[in-house]
Image (cartoon, rainbow, N blue to C red):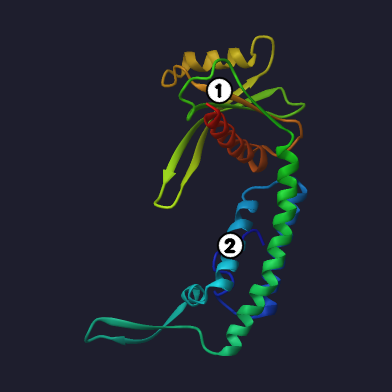
Amino acid sequence: MESLSKNWITEKHIDFEYKKYLLLAYLQHVSDYFTENKLYPHLSELVSHYRNVLSLKENKQHMFDSFPERMTKADIRNLKIVYEKILQDDQLMKEVESIINFSIPKFEQYLQEGKKIYDCIESRLNIFPVGIVPLQVNEGYIFLGLPDDTDTRVYEYQITLFENPDEKYRGIYTEYVGSYKRSLAYTFESIKSDLIRYHKKLPNPATYVIESELSVPLDETLLPMAKRSLMKYVATKGEKN
């Protein structure tokens, strides 16, 4: 099973053995990807599922709201349709609680597995700027490199700060630009110069190289980790300045 619905616990047939089968099939799929060092999107999904089951356990109203509804009658005179929650008896709630109590330690187990892989790869990532770093570092270019690969993959990036009443957080958007074969003619500095020459909208771009010492999948691991690492790197440098 490649994916697990957000409301997998409360939708369709609510039976502990059935939900256990769904969860274990999904987690086996995740584990297969982790074995290949493919972290995304599964690591993010695990975090989301784990938070959801904790919320269900801690918030009974949230659990009630997550149950599907069925139509009980149609009031044609008042143009209303009356629904009721499919929340029938204590036995059903016991099934849901059993599913939740089984799933929480399972999600924790696989999150720990994913985090261990993430931390190992992150410790072998090297990030450094190319040339002079401008004052504006929220947009520019990322150069990605893997060992035993002469290609430098170039992505344009843009970091955006989001705010709500309680907190601020950063998001990053990337777009693939192209690849360069590293050589005496195409050093990181010359690639940056080439980009400035042909992409006029960024005349003085912040440019960072992010290289992995480990051979990992590009799209499922290196790129998403590079994006997170760059946001942390830029934020840290900004605090020091």
Residue in the picture at 48% in, 76% down: 61
Q: Residues within 10 Å of mark 2 (few under 14, many from 20)?
A: some
Report the residue marked by disc 1: 207
Q: Is residue 210 left or right of residue 7?
A: right
Horizontal side of 138 relative to 22 (left or right) equals: left
Per the image, label 2 sits on a secondary structure element best described as: helix
Q: Disc 1 or 2, which lies upstream in sequence? A: 2
Front residue (pair 103, 73): 103
- Quick check: can you spot residue 219? yes
Q: Is residue 204 left or right of residue 22?
A: left
Residue 1 position, x and y percent, is 67, 62
- Residue 39: image x %, image y %? 68, 47
- The residue sitting at 68% across, 69% down in the picture is 103
Which residue is the extreme one toward the front? 240
| Type of amino acid under label 1 | Thr
Q: Which residue is mark 2?
A: 51
Q: Residue at x 76, y 35 (%)?
A: 215
Callout 2 amino acid = Arg
Task: Answer yes or no: is residue 30 visible.
Answer: no
In the rendered structure, find residue 162 and report the number of the disc placed on it.
none
Point out the residue furthest to the left here. 77
CA distance for labels 1 and 2: 35 Å
Q: Position of residue 224 (x, y in %)?
A: 61, 40
Identify the residue at horizontal 54%, vertical 13% (top origin). 193
Which of 73 and 46 lies nearest the eye of the viewer?
46
Q: Are marks 1 and 2 in contact (CB under 8 Å)?
A: no
Q: Secondary structure at mark 1?
A: strand
